[in-house]
Image (spheres, helix red, strand yellow):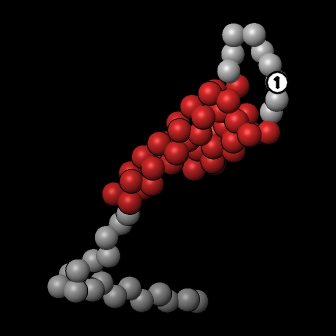
Amino acid sequence: MGIGGCIGLIGLGAILTFAVDWHIKGVNTALVGLIMMAVGIIGLAAYVSIFKRRRVQPPSPAAPVIDVEEHRF
């Protein structure tokens, strides 16, 4: 699940919790909305923490510099 999916879950959960007044027998739409928002927030936090770990580190100053020259004809 990416960032878009997590934000979508948060938005859909907020709509179900705060903007819908449906009364479905056996289903509490406000609770379903809160669960969806919680799953979206947890997913977003997990995605961001994994993305931070995958960030490429810049080379250290002691690394050799490779100079590439291009010749155009």
20 w.r.t. 69: above or below:
above
Q: How many marks?
A: 1
| Position of the N terminus by quadrant | top right
Q: Is residue 19 left or right of residue 38?
A: right
Residue at 62%, 27% (x, y): give it: 31
Q: Is residue 22 left or right of residue 46?
A: right
| Residue in view at x 79 percent, y 39 percent | 19
Q: Measuring from the top left, give residue 18's x and y in whole percent.
A: 74, 40
Q: Is residue 36 visible?
A: no
Q: Nearer the viewer, residue 24 or 41?
A: 24
Report the residue that reaches farthest toward the left: 62
Give the image quarter of residue 53.
bottom left
x then y, percent, for residue 58: 32, 76
Q: Position of residue 50 (x, y in %)?
A: 38, 51
For label 1, count other residues whose C-alpha is less than 10 Å away and answer few (under 14), some (14-19) or many (20+): few
Q: Which residue is mark 1?
A: 22
Nearer to us in this view, 63 or 3: 3
Q: Nearer the viewer, residue 8 or 38?
A: 38
The residue shown at (80%, 19%) is 23
Viewer can see residue 44: yes
Residue 44: x, y in percent?
51, 48
Task: Please identify the quarter of the rendering in which residue 68 is found.
Answer: bottom left
Residue furthest top in the image = 25
Name the side, left or right, on which 69 lies relative to 5: left
- In the image: residue 68, left or right of residue 37: left
As shown in the figure, which amino acid type bears the numbered disc 1? Trp
Q: Quadrant of the C terminus?
A: bottom right
Q: Residue at x 17, y 85 (%)?
A: 62
Q: Quadrant of residue 72?
A: bottom right
Question: Could you tell me which secondary element the residue under label 1 belongs to?
Answer: loop
- Up the image or down, 16 lies above or below 50; here it is above
